[in-house]
Image: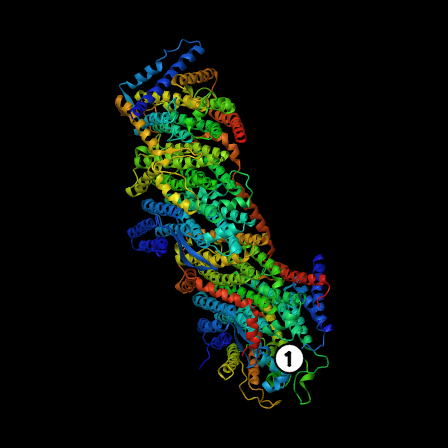
Amino acid sequence: MVKNILIAIGLPLLAFGIGISFMGFKRKIGARIQRRYGPPFHQPLLDIIKLLSKKSDISHGIIYDLGPMIALGASILTIFFIPIPGLKLLTGSADVIALLYIMVIGSLGMGLGAGESANPNSSIGIARALTLMFGYDLPFVIVIISVLLKYHTTNLYAITQAQAGGHWAMWVLPLSAIVGFIVIYGAMGEHPFDVVTAPHEVATGPMAEYGGKHLGLLFIDHAFHVYIELALFVDLFMGGASNIGWFYVKMFVLFLIIVFFDEVLPRFRIDDAVRFYWRWPTIIALTSLIIVLIGG
Amino acid sequence: MIRKITYTIFLSIIVATLILFFVAFPFGKNKMGVGKYYLNNDIKQTGAANVVTAVTLDYRGLDTLGEVTVLFAAAAGVSILFYLIDQDKKKRERQVYPNFIVRVGSRIIFPFILLFGSYIFIHGHLTPGGGFQGGSIIASGFLLLYLAYPGERVNRKKLAVTEGLAGLTFVVFGAIGIFTGAHSFLFNFFPKGTLNMLFSAGILPILYIAIGFKVGSEFAGIIDDMMCQTVCGGEK
Amino acid sequence: MNMSLMVLLLTPFTGGILSYLGGKIHRSVRYTFAILFSSLTLVELFFYYNKPVNHFVLGKMFGSVMILQINPISWLFAFIVTTISLLAIIFSVNDMEGRGGLDFYYFELMVVEGAMLGITLAGDLLTFFLFWEIMSWTSYLLIIQGGNKSIKAGYKYIIMSIIGANSMLIAIAMIYGKIHTLVFRNVAMLLAASPHGFDIAIFVLFAIGFFVEAAVMPLHTWVSDAYSEAPSSVSSVLSGVLEKIGAYGLFVLLYALFGVSLLGKLMPLRFPSPTIMYTIGWFAGISIVVSTFLAILQEDAKKLLAYSSISQIGYVVLGISIGTSLGVAGGLFHALNHAIFKSLLFFTIGAVIYRTGTRNLSELGGLIKKMPVTFTGTLFGIIALAGVPPLNGFVSKWMIYEALLQKKEVFLLILALIGSTGSFLYVYRLIHSTFLGQLPEKFKDVKEVPFLMQIPIWLLSLGTIVFGIWPGLAMNVIARGEKFFGITPIKYNLYGFPGGNGMGSLKMINISSVFIAGLIVAYIIFALGAKTHRISQYDNYAAGQVVTKDTKYNYSYGFYMFFGRVVNPVFKWSADKIYLAWARSANVFGDYMRRIYTGNLETYSSYIVVIISLVGFLILLGGKIW
Amino acid sequence: MIFYVGAFILIAVGLYAIIIKKNLVKIIIGLDLISSGTNLLIVSIGYVKGGTAPIFSHPGILPQMMVDPVPQALTLTAIVIGASELALAAAFVAILYKHYGTLDIRKVRGLKW
Amino acid sequence: MVNLTNPILLIAVPLFFVFLAAVIAPFSKRATKYLPPVAFLINLIITLYLIPQVAEKGVIVATTAGIKPPFAINIAVDGLGLSLAIIASLLGLIASLYNLKYITEEPQDKFNMLFLLLGTGITWMVITGDMFNLFVAFEVTSISAFGLVGFLRDKDSIEAGFKYLVMGSIGASLLLIGVVMLYAATGTLNMADIAEKIARFSFRQKLLPYSFIFTGLGIEGALFPLNAWLPDAHPAAPSSVSSILSGIMTTAAIYAIIRATVTVFNYSAITPFILLIALLTLVFGETSAFFQKDIKRMLAYSTIGQTGFFFFAFSLGSVQGMQGAFMQILNHSLSKAMLFLIAGAMITQVHSRNIDDFSGIGKKMKISSVFFAIGAFSLMGLPPFFGFWSKLTIIFATLAYTNFYTITLVVILLFMSVIEGAYFFRVMQSMFFGKLKEGTEIKEASPGLVVPFVILGIVILTLAIYPTPIIAVSKKIAVQLIHRAVYINAVLGGL
């Protein structure tokens, strides 16, 4: 019981910590790639504290307030279904397919809040976000299905366990892993799929009207989000980890590669992004799926 | 031309098949079925010397009723078609009458025609002829009068009443049969009399007289309608 | 007690007649009767909750008995029928106010309810078909209540529905010709006893009938017009119930008449499930994805919902067609859920139309401030519709996904998952363009709908939560029904599914409680921050410009236009256009055909001659007659 | 046999007239030809070679010597019916002439399809 | 004791009234119009009296001239004949009641006589037991119909009447030739007698007389392609006449064909051929009806289609097929007659026969429109109306043996029923939901017109609510018809 309570309190903190550290890394690494010095490593944390402690804040209505809260609540919900080393967490209550939809709650809350703000930039941003999601979802579900079929289970923890001892899904299903990797770009909104928040076009999109503690909540949410995407990929394709340290290392390596590409790529137009996802990643993912189907 | 040839071919096929059919029943061969029964039992059952009349009025009396009805319907149809909304137009304009001989001659002949017609239908059960033939002859008398006097008209009311009463006679005499012992329409309930006498064959002469009147008046009516149409209503 | 099945069936009909007559006295009498009798039907139905009746003979026709029966599955569908109809009646009290011919409208509504109830209660094909036909033409009369445009929509509907009913009729006649009985149980027994190639034709013909009513993809073309042009409460009945009746028909066809084993025998097994069922699954899958795409691109709220209905019914059909216990349960459960959330959405959109008079999405916006109850209802509706936990739509969809995965029907699974993702797009569009964003000046004085119209919204919102968190409630009925049809039900408990046998586990209460906990954490963080103050909707970031009242500072027209650029090339041709082209060519052909009545006497008489001479020719060909 | 053939040819000619001829009067003449042909056919069917009229005009005539009386009776009826039809047809033609001012059937085509 | 139950009274009574009308007419034209209702009412009562007898004996035979059947004309009433006689009397009664108000044209006396004669002829056709008598009855019917079609004397009706007359006369002649051929072959004219004697002939030998009789009756019975006069003639007549023509007259001719095929010729081998004709009739009728702009013309084409439909059912040759045919005949007669009466009532208000002009009158002429819908629904075979059961029976009968042939037939059949639904729904849509034309003053037709068709509508509704006894009776009738020996024995051996 005590352990459960500890997990319930500790897991969000852990996830937040990991997420915020990666946010810091990103800014730092990105700056170095562009030959800048960059902000301090803990700058994201400072930002969040600053935003939360702002003295005045505006609101467009209840849903405007509720949107970031739903987003954050959903992210907290989600982390309990992604096993970390040594812990099953709540994976028995929702399997991978359920997880796919649990992850959506956050975007929905975000979208509602952004919509309420009555700013066309936000609306366009959300429309783009949803379309992009539709775009990368097709290869993503194919990838997920091939993994599930490969391991004959839908339980994420069981999948992680099955990969124990270096039999990573990445090596077993290389094509799926590649597609999964491409999908993460879209899911995290990194280049070349950052059309959602593109500041020059739609003034950071959904967040255009947000400020103060609302934006603070969204920053926290973003930290969780980074953690979720990376942890999910690690659990699915990189066999989880035996301890938290390894887990962190794996996530970091993955993140490093993502950031490298992110910083050098230009931006897709939204319909081109969808077309892209529905072309090569889908074909590769389908190939992988058929291989799984035939190979058993 | 192609049409004509085509249809000629079609029609000759029909004729050919008909001929082929009737090869089995050659002309003059005795094909009698019920006919034989009629010939054998006519005297006993109807008492009419003319078997054709017996068949027409007795054995197949319902046909004759139908025939009369058809004629009646046709007459009604003709008068519907020639009906003029404007009643004044029915008044005949004076026209050039035919010459004297026709006028006088027709007046002289007319009673004889009537007499002859009546003779034919009254003796229908004895000699060839009957109600229809007699009625037609009477109607031809009326036609003659019309030709001679285009401006005059028959009294249609009286014609209509005659027509109706004659029909009623037929139906009523037929229906009486139902209420007699035989429970049969057109049952010949009158005494049969002696063969070849005028008062013989039960109700047959009565029916024929009724038919004679009816046919005569109906044809007269049709002639009247047509005459009226051509003489007074023709141009519109 | 046995007689009361007849009473149950007659209650809505009686109510219809009484409310029609009552309406002549006063409108309140009409409403009283309509609501009273439809609630009475619901109450009577609950007497049968756990009490199947197998055999209640209505009469004898063509040497086959006409019977009524009730089993758990038909109870489930009867429950959907009566509930949604009752709510629709309540909703239309205010919604239809001021229109002409209301007595007739209520009469029709209740007759449709009765006919659909009759379909669910039917124990033989004749009764089934009888009520089916009554349902089709009475629902046609309901559709055309919506004004001028609806007449055209109704015409399309009735033609398609007659075609569907007729193909069903052929199938019934074929069954009758084969085995001379029409009672479900005997039919199942005798069909299984002697499988024959024509059974496939019977199946296909039945399926056409059900596809039309359930609006599965190639036969869906009536839906978008009919749903959008009919009055809102009628749309909710159509979408919530009528489609379900089509799904019920499919269920009866697959499990009561044919059975999976017979279907497997009829066509050699090559696919994960019997070929026929797999084909149906593909039809369902295609209608899920294609109509999702179409829904995304709609500008009209009710059309959007109509296409969404096609897509959602695809899930129901897909679930039923899988053939496993889990799939069937998922399909049936989704039928219930779809009835709940889609009716809810039609009611809320109906409420919006009632207040604003438009259903054009780009004209609406910002109504959340004016109609909070309606917004809440819509929110629940769209979350359920999109299949997002913790509401009910998620559970049933999840079951269908699991069933597909279990059977390794992966391509269908992809279609199903993609359809669900696509539905986020259009549901967001729906709620955003109506309730969020800028409130147009002309809707400044819009008020919340009257209380009577809120009742259905409240109740159905509650339904989405209840069946979402406690799926076991519905699974009770479904499991008993599966047992009734000889399918071993899956393991379930009140909160979800323990899983096993290749199926994942699900515990809805955990998901929802953790979510609430997360929300509380987020709220605490939020509450710790500074107080917020409300600002006007025009006080907005506009890149330095000033937004005034006459500015339309809203993004709602062509919401997914960029997405349209991706998919539009595919949708250049549609089933509707193909049908229209067929109809046109048939029209031209018919026009030529009737030229045989030329009006010329000589032609007419020549027909006679030709006919006889043809006969003569035949005779002459033989050479002789005698 | 020639009576039969004659009757058939009358019928055929009547049909031919109806189909080919354009004049309304000729068409009703065609009708009349058909009915005449039919009557001729009926009467000739009833003929028995060497038979006399079926009238017992004097005792010497026995039923065996007579021709079939039934076709004669039928003919009587058929003639009247034919005549009635003809009268009606003539009336129709007269009114048609009044409406159209012509007897050409090709002009009388108000109703079609 | 007056023997009310002699079926010959069905002919005698109306004829009595016809001739009575001729006597009365010169004195009072108005009085004549009260005679047809009385006559038809008496006929209806007589037919109802006959029901128990027919139910008991199967076939009741009445002689004429007190001579046994083969030698004199006889009247033989079996189930099918009696049912049609009941329908004819009922429709006659209702249409003549309708006439009281409807007919304002002159000459009314002649009209009433012909109208009565039309009903009489139809009754005569369905109860007679003699081939030549059938021809006479046929002529009574058609000659009165010719006159009635031309009754309005405008361009259309005269043209239609003339076409009808020429076609009808050819048909009558063909029928006569066929009958005469039968006489030449068998030496008798009685149907039962012919049936017995013709049994020794082969299929080929029977073909020619059969085809003549078939063609002759087929012209009146609206069979393709002999039915071209019908769409002209039926609409041209006054509506009450159209209702009789469409409702029962074509049916009576079909009855005669059925009688000839089943009882006289026992010609089951011909069924594929007549099935083809029935199907073509159906297809062409319904297709053409779909394109009509004129409501009465549309209904007339629909009659052709319906005729094809029940003739199709008959040509299946099975008991169930006959049953379906009979049920459809009943349904079609009542519904189509009512539709024509309603169309007539509407035309008196709208002063046009164009369907477009009917738009929106449902709001003004509520009763008429609602009953129109009832009739149309029944005709289309939508439940719970009686047409549903007949359609079902016919489909079941067709698919009694499932193969590609029967399935194709049923598909065609049902496709045609879709077309029928399409045009009826189109009319009803424009009636109920169309826009009323500006400046037209339309109100409900006078009660004199409404009451008759409402009576008919009530009959239809009664059938809808309580179809079971009629279905049972129709089965009996079908069985009786198929077992032709019953009929033959009753006529030849009876008395």
Residue E184 versus residue C143: which sits nearer the camera?
E184
Where E187 falls versus C317 (above or below)? below
The crowd level at tag 1 (other Cα within 10 Å; few <14, some 14-19, many 20+) is many
Where B181 falls versus E190 (above or below)? below
> Which part of the image, by quadrant, shows the C terminus of chain B?
bottom right
Name the residue rendered at 30%, 17% in the picture: A49
- Tell me the element at label 1: helix
Instruction: Residue E117: tell me if it is visible.
Output: yes
Q: Amino acid at mark 1?
A: Gly
Q: Position of residue E495 (x, y in %)?
A: 54, 79
Q: Residue at label 1?
A: B35
Q: Position of residue E421 (x, y in %)?
A: 49, 53
> Which part of the image, by quadrant, shows the N terminus of chain B?
bottom right
Q: Position of residue C325 (x, y in %)?
A: 44, 41
Name the residue rendered at 39%, 18% in the picture: A243
Name the residue rendered at 68%, 84% in the picture: D64
Residue E371: which quarter of the image?
A: bottom left
Instruction: Residue B46: tell me if it is visible.
Output: no
Where C113 falls versus C381 (above or below)? below
Residue C510: which quarter of the image?
A: top left
